[in-house]
Image (cartoon, rainbow, N blue to C red):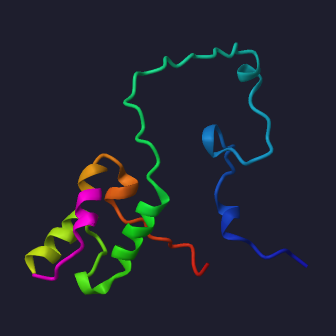
């Protein structure tokens, strides 16, 4: 009994080369003899990272985020949300604005970080 023909039987087989190589195969012998050169990356002068914010401040901001009386908070920075609530006459808390202006360069304070990992 003859084996059924497959569509792949109609095409010539080609060896894979380069990054498309299947896992587990060894590299060519040419690559084995190359000398590995380690490049040292210079330390670039960076601005110092801001100190971590006070946990009490983060808790106060979290309560502001969860309070729906000041409008939706998705997609807007906290200061923008505070200003929008002020313009609408919703009387947002003043200490929130002061904290946001004081820590303007710290993204942990400026933006609301949303947990998307499920319940927990």
> Is residue 44 in view from this perspective?
yes
Q: Is residue 53 above or below residue 79?
A: above
Answer with left or right where residue 33 lies relative to residue 119: right
> Is residue 77 in view from this perspective?
no
Q: Position of residue 16 (x, y in %)?
A: 66, 44
Q: Position of residue 31 (x, y in %)?
A: 71, 22
Give the camera-side residue of 74 and 21.
74
Dividing the picture into quadrants, the one containing residue 71 is bottom left
Q: Residue at x 63, y 46 (%)?
A: 20
Answer with left or right where residue 45 lies relative to residue 16: left
Answer with left or right where residue 110 lies relative to residue 39: left
Residue furthest right as drawn: 1
How many marks do you count on the picture?
0
Answer with left or right where residue 116 lies relative to residue 82: right
Give the camera-side residue of 119 and 102.
102
Dividing the picture into quadrants, the one containing residue 10 is bottom right
Q: Is residue 114 above or below residue 50?
A: below
On-image quarter of the N terminus: bottom right
Q: Position of residue 15 (x, y in %)?
A: 69, 43
Q: Residue at x 39, y 69 (%)?
A: 60
Q: Is residue 77 above or below residue 34?
A: below
Q: Position of residue 53 (x, y in %)?
A: 44, 52
Q: Residue at x 43, y 21 (%)?
A: 44
Q: Is residue 61 magenta?
A: no
On-image quarter of the C terminus: bottom right
Span shown in magenta? 89-99
Q: Is residue 97 magenta?
A: yes
């Amino acid at each position: 009994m003859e084996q059924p023909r497959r569509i792949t039987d109609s095409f010539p087989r080609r060896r894979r080369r380069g990054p498309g190589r299947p896992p587990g195969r060894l590299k060519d012998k040419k690559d084995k003899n190359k000398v590995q050169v380690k490049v040292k990356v210079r330390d670039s002068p960076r601005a110092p990272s801001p100190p971590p914010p006070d946990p009490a401040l983060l808790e106060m901001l979290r309560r502001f985020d969860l309070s729906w009386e000041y409008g939706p908070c998705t997609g807007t920075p906290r200061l923008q949300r505070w200003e929008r609530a002020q313009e609408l006459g919703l009387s947002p808390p003043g200490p929130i604005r002061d904290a946001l202006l004081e820590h303007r360069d710290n993204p942990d304070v400026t933006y609301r970080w949303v947990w998307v990992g499920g319940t927990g």
